[in-house]
Image: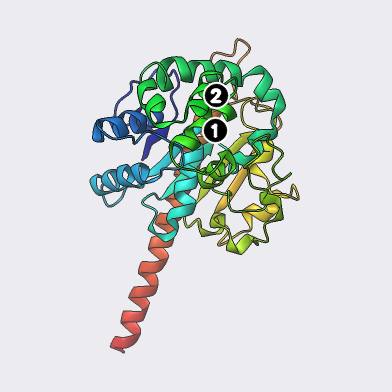
Amino acid sequence: MIYQIFRAKRETPSQSIFCKHTDNWTLGWFHLFSFIKDLSVMMHPLGKNMFHMARTDDVAEAAMKVRQSIGPNQILTGVGFSMGGIILSNYVARSGESCQLHAAIAVSGGLDLREQVNSHRSQRLWQPVMARRLLRENLIGKYGFKYKEHLKDEEYLNLLRAQDATAVDTSTAAYNGFNNVMEYYSEVSAMGDAPSQSGCRYSDSTAVNYSQSVCTVESERIANVSIPLCVLHALDDPIISWRSVVRKNNQPSDIVESGSGNVMLLLTKSGGHVGWPVGWKITGWSWMNNLLRDFTNAVDETLKEEGVIADMKRAKSVLSRMK
């Protein structure tokens, strides 16, 4: 069973509903960005709380509620796309053994958002469109009064002038009490406490140089992942850099061998951002969708096999005590 409850806002044939399930493998579509953003405002209509990507408690609560509603022979897989993938990976890494999911798949999300500050092609070509839409529809269009009230005049002016996602996130960081955007990205990312690939070269004078960190693989939160986590990313992703899914030495093996070895990286040469289209007319997304299904089925079969083996061991132990 797959509940796609962790999804960034994106046009899909499905409806924006919470945990609707059918007999098919695609179960429950839920727009994470819209949900958390609106939930934070509805729950605190008089406060300053607003959505930011470092918050994982909403995800934990939603996963726990869904986990309580499924049957004993069903598994719960979280699937995150883009922003949803970033938050999902962070939740899985931070929750460790208390993770409410049986498996997770992060699609085009990235594990270390600090690398985005140096993704200059994305900042020039794609992020201006994203920034304008975010400002028009949400940050300024709906909740501008909150930002104007709680940001300093210069910070609010910088938000209005934002031309890329990093500039928007800088204002989000300031609004939510982070010292700077690099600290915010560190808290957002599953590998945010690891040594960064290239250090901080962002123009923010208050940013922290994380490249001098002395963390080891085993001391980072990515090593806390306790469930199968598949990270799907294309090397030509125009939005989130491929550098966000590798470590400083560009060796993916360091990530997949961290902790108990529960992280799996699936890196493709092409595919774009939440893409991997198929067909001459590029009318379908079956490659990506089938991968989600097959990964979940593989986890389900493995868990069942492990359950049978555990039952056999328990039965053998009981028989041995009876002799």
Instruction: Evaluate if marks 2 and 1 touch, with contact meaning CB atoms under 8 Å apart.
Output: yes
Residue placed most toward the observer, 103 or 31: 31
Quarter of the rendering occupied by the C terminus: bottom left
Q: Which residue is mark 1?
A: 170
Residue 189, position as x, y percentages in the image: 54, 45
Q: CA distance from mark 2 to mark 1?
A: 9 Å
Q: Which residue is mark 2?
A: 158
Element type at marker 2?
helix
Residue placed most toward the observer, 221 or 66: 221
Q: Quadrant of residue 282?
A: top right
Q: Amino acid at mark 2?
A: Asn
Q: Quadrant of residue 306?
A: bottom left
Q: Quadrant of residue 317?
A: bottom left
Residue drawn where x is 60% and y is 16% of the image: 279
Between discs 2 and 1, the one toward the N terminus:
2
Residue 295's place in the image compared with 100, above or below, is above
